[in-house]
Structures are given as C-alpha cells and as structure tokens.
Image: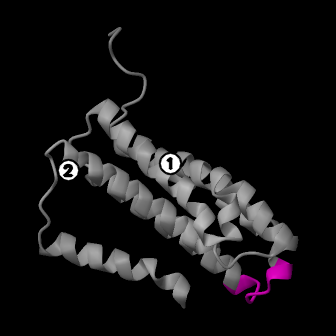
Amino acid sequence: MKNKKRHDRKGFWWQLFRSLIVSPLIVGFIGVFGLGWWWAMIPALLLNGIYWYHYNKKNQIANVSNEIKAMIISLVYYLGVFSLIMIVYRYNYVAMSEYPLIAFAFPYNLSSLIAGAFLMYDLFPWLIIGTFWSGVLGAVYYQSVAGQFPKLGKRQMTWLIGLCLISLLPLY
C-alpha cells in the first residue's frame, strides 16, 4: 500500500488534466508574445513538446492513445470556446475585451488578458492549435525513440487527416 501512487499518472483523467490545464499554462504564459509576432510562439511550443516528451519518458508511457484523446478534447474545448466568443461578439475585438467570457480559456489567461488589452486575437487560435500539436509531437517522438510507435489503421489515418483539417480552421 505504501508504494501505491496517489494519482494514476497514466490514466485518462490525469492526462485530461494535463492537456486542459498544465499544457495551456506552459504555452499561455511563455507564448504570450506570440500574439503579436507568430515566431515568438516557437519557444513556448518547443517547451510544451519537451514537457510531454519528458513526462512520457519519466513515466514510461507505452500507449499514447489516452494522451491523444485528452489533447483532442482540449483542442475541441478551447477552439469551441474561442469560436463561441467570436460569434457572440460578432468578431468585435473591442467588445470581447470588455466582457469576461474569455475566462473560459483560463489556462491561457495571461495570453487572453494581453490579447484583450491590445486587441490581438488574430493569433490566439494558433496558440491553441500549436499547444495541441506540440504536445502530440512530444508524446509521439518519445514513442518513436522508445521503439513503441503505434501503427495507424484506416480509421486512425482518417482521424489524423480530420485533425489536420480542423487545425486549419483559423484560416477561415
């Protein structure tokens, strides 16, 4: 009983917490300057990918499916919140900065506050998508280094193509 971990570090709920809170905190606070200059997001995204890689290495995660599912939920949630806010305020950046709906993107709080203060919401969805893909790449890179890279079937390839298309949504 003494050796039993308090949290199951490999379980889905822990992965969901990491993808909804921890990863956005890393990117949201470090990548805040990326709202003005896209290239300023790169260090934050690299740090996020390194975080996921080291977490998988430390805990010897053999199956990344729970992590990827949790990251997809996080991506859909934050892009959904941002899209809803954009629709509610009819793409009016000034109105968005006056109301607290952006609080639903709490882990990106510093970035959302800066975006609201300087009316720089153009790159905010890219911050969300970059968080997702840097986390996925960090986890998958560990799998490839460890020799546990999963083979993708037709269904997984369809999901991967769908995720790539969803990632292009901010272009609209």
Badge 2 marks a residue whose secondary structure is: helix
Q: Please name whichever residue, 52 or 64, is drawn nearer the observer in this view of the structure.
A: 52
Crowd tier of the residue under label 2, counting other residues whose Cα lies within 10 Å: few below 14, some 14–19, many 20 or above: few
Type of the residue with mark 2: Ser
In which quadrant is the C terminus drawn? bottom right
* Residue located 67% across and 51% down the image: 29
With respect to residue 94, does 107 lie above or below?
A: above
Based on the displayed image, in which of its 4 quarters is residue 133 positioned? bottom left
- Residue 104 in view (yes/no): no
Task: Tell whether 166 sits left or right of 81.
Answer: left
User: Residues in magenta?
Assistant: 87-95
* Residue 78 image position (x, y, % from top left): 56, 66
Residue at label 2? Answer: 144
Task: Tell whether 20 sits left or right of 31.
Answer: left
In which quadrant is the N terminus drawn? top left
Task: Tell whether 36 sits left or right of 11.
Answer: right
Badge 1 marks a residue whose secondary structure is: helix
Q: Tell me, yes or no, whether the two marked residues, 2 and 1, touch with CB atoms within 8 Å.
A: no
